[in-house]
Amino acid sequence: MTAQRFTGKTALVTGAGSGIGRAVALAFAREGAHVVVAGRGRGPLDETVALIEEAGGKALAVTADVSRAADVRAAVEAAVAFPHSRLRSSGGTPIGSLDVAVNNAGVFRGGTPVADLSDEDWRTQLDINVTGVFHALRAEVRQMRTQPAGGAIVNIASTFGLHKRSPGATAYAATKAAVSVLTRGAALDHIADGVRINAVSPGATATAMSLRPGETEEGRAERMRGETPLGRVSSVEEVTAAVLYLASDDASSVVGTDLVVDGGQTA
């Protein structure tokens, strides 16, 4: 039987149209949460919502570009109003809360040495991977610190960053290192507000992002047998389990950690 650690809670997941974000959204719904899925593409978000609803869960899609602060504020407001949009206090304010947030939206522009990196690729990664997380953290904490029960936030960083580097991925690694530092600093800033903030740093995971140009899943499996002690990529479910742990009351004393899930590659 699936645990129900998030019954009655509302969770917001960015970058939820595919990959880890979608898996996280589905997992929260299975454990009883009402889930707001956010991202730039409406079609993939609607697919995530459909999967959740087919399994008996409740979900809402919100189109949002995390590099735009107003979009993130609107997503947080939608989460607070959902699933209580028809219930209003006497002053007309939506009755609800944002209990959990997972800031997963990110992009990778790899394969290029620093000296050959375009301004556009640098800015895109910085705007989404770092500024996007900042926008999300700020909006989420501002809401959660008004709530009696506070809330929990999990940022998705990466083993690329503080934990390892690789030729051609320097810009991406710099942005994800920033996510880890931002997570730990914000955790110290806001634990007194009742908001717990942590990060998960996945290594190679069974998503399209871990495939090299032209590489098949079979080719990736062969490569990973020699690149990681575990001998394979992590599944999205394994990464998701780490995220849900940090978001749950099981991790009530875990503050400002960066949990690596990479099959021992950076051990």
Image: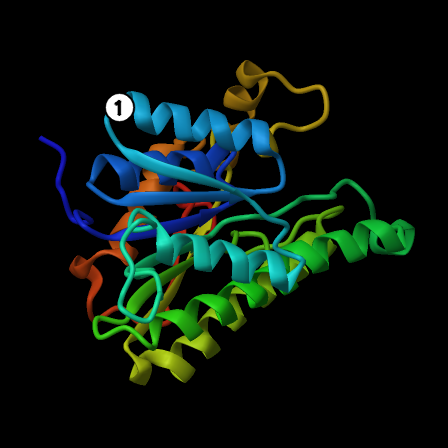
Name which residue lies at 32% across and 82% down: 193
Name which residue lies at 35% across and 66% down: 93
Residue 197 % position (x, y): 37, 68
Of 7 and 87, which appears nearest the observer?
A: 87
Residue 34 relative to residue 143: left or right:
left
Task: Give the colour scheme of this rendering.
Answer: rainbow
Q: Amino acid at mark 1?
A: Ala
Residue 161 relative to residue 262: left or right:
right
Q: Residue furthest left?
A: 1
Of 204 and 179, which appears nearest the observer?
A: 179
Q: Residues within 10 Å of mark 1 (few under 14, many from 20)?
A: few
Name which residue lies at 22% across and 75% down: 148
Res. 208 visible in picture: yes
Of 227 and 243, which appears nearest the observer?
A: 243
Quadrant in the rendering for residue 80: bottom left
Residue 257 % position (x, y): 36, 67
Which residue in the structure is indicated by mark 1?
Answer: 55
State which quarter of the image contains the N terminus. top left
